[in-house]
Amino acid sequence: MNILSIQSWVSYGHVGNAAAVFPMQRLGHEVWAVNTVQFSNHTGYGSWRGTVFPPQLIRDLVAGIEERGVLPRCDALLSGYLGDPEVAEAVLEAWERLRAANPAAIYCADPVIGDEGTGVYVRPGVAELIRDRILPAADILTPNLFELRHLTGLSCVTLAGVQEAVRAVQARGPRIVLVTSLRTEETPDEALDMLVAEGGAFHWLRMPLLPISVNGAGDAVAALFLVHWLGGRSAAAALSAAGSAIFGILSQTLALGQREIALVAAQQEIASPSRVFEPIAC
């Protein structure tokens, strides 16, 4: 498959395209990466160098890809962190170009807005544009729990509450919603859940909670879920594959004592996870 991935890029570490491209390639797919920023490292370090690319550069790169005559062979668009409302507009324009070239293409949007503990960390206007424009355009949406709450205004403290919020999102466009990290009143202290909804069915996945906090795991999960869903058209199977792979990657990252996710060292976990978690219908 061919995936157009429009996200940020860092030279050191793994977030944005630097977290998403390699897992998709490791699974045998071509990735056409368009970078929205070029930073030395992710901003969680407190200091970084680099630049945010102008939205017109994104438009030009997508236009150049289109001029090669290959957009009809592009299976999906994946987008992640959008540093500016105009960047989001450029992503939506890219989706319109792709959909016109290949009506069967899929748009998977990771609605990066913020997280527990940090709150909203995108620029003013980005969260609103994601809610009002990106969300309705997407076929697959991959929020974390904080983003799900922000997009719906619902508390999501129970599994039933999360399901209610997911239904509210689906009513606005995306037919598949993956909640990438989830802790509710029903989640044991030593566990972390993921949940996916498709076609009125819900499946959740429970994994051991690892004592690790890293950037980029959500970016990798969105990419893994997208390609596994494209390969089998089953949200439950894609949830199992993506969740099992990221657990293996994070387990090895923890063992190595790294701050950055160990995508290269743990690449066998991408292709064949050492521990497989099975989803449960709920």
Image: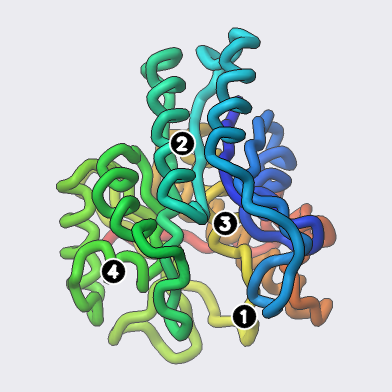
Chain-order first, disc 3 or disc 4: 4
How many neighbours does mark 3 have within 10 angstroms: few (below 14), some (14-19), or many (20 or more)? many
Of the pair 48 and 253, the residue shown nearer to us: 48
**Residue at (47, 60) in percent of width and height:** 278
Mark 3 → mark 4, Cα distance in angstroms: 19 Å
Discs 1/4, front: 4
Of the pair 89 and 250, the residue shown nearer to us: 89
Q: In the rendered view, tell whether residue 199 sits above or below residue 63.
A: below
Q: Amino acid at mark 2?
A: Ala
Chain-order first, disc 1 or disc 4: 4
Q: Which residue is mark 2?
A: 90
Residue 13: x and y in percent read: 76, 63
Mark 2 → mark 1, Cα distance in angstroms: 31 Å
Whether residue 216 is visible to the viewer of this picture, yes or no, is: yes
Residue 11 as seen in the image, left or right of residue 225: right
Chain-order first, disc 1 or disc 3: 1
Q: Which residue is mark 1?
A: 213
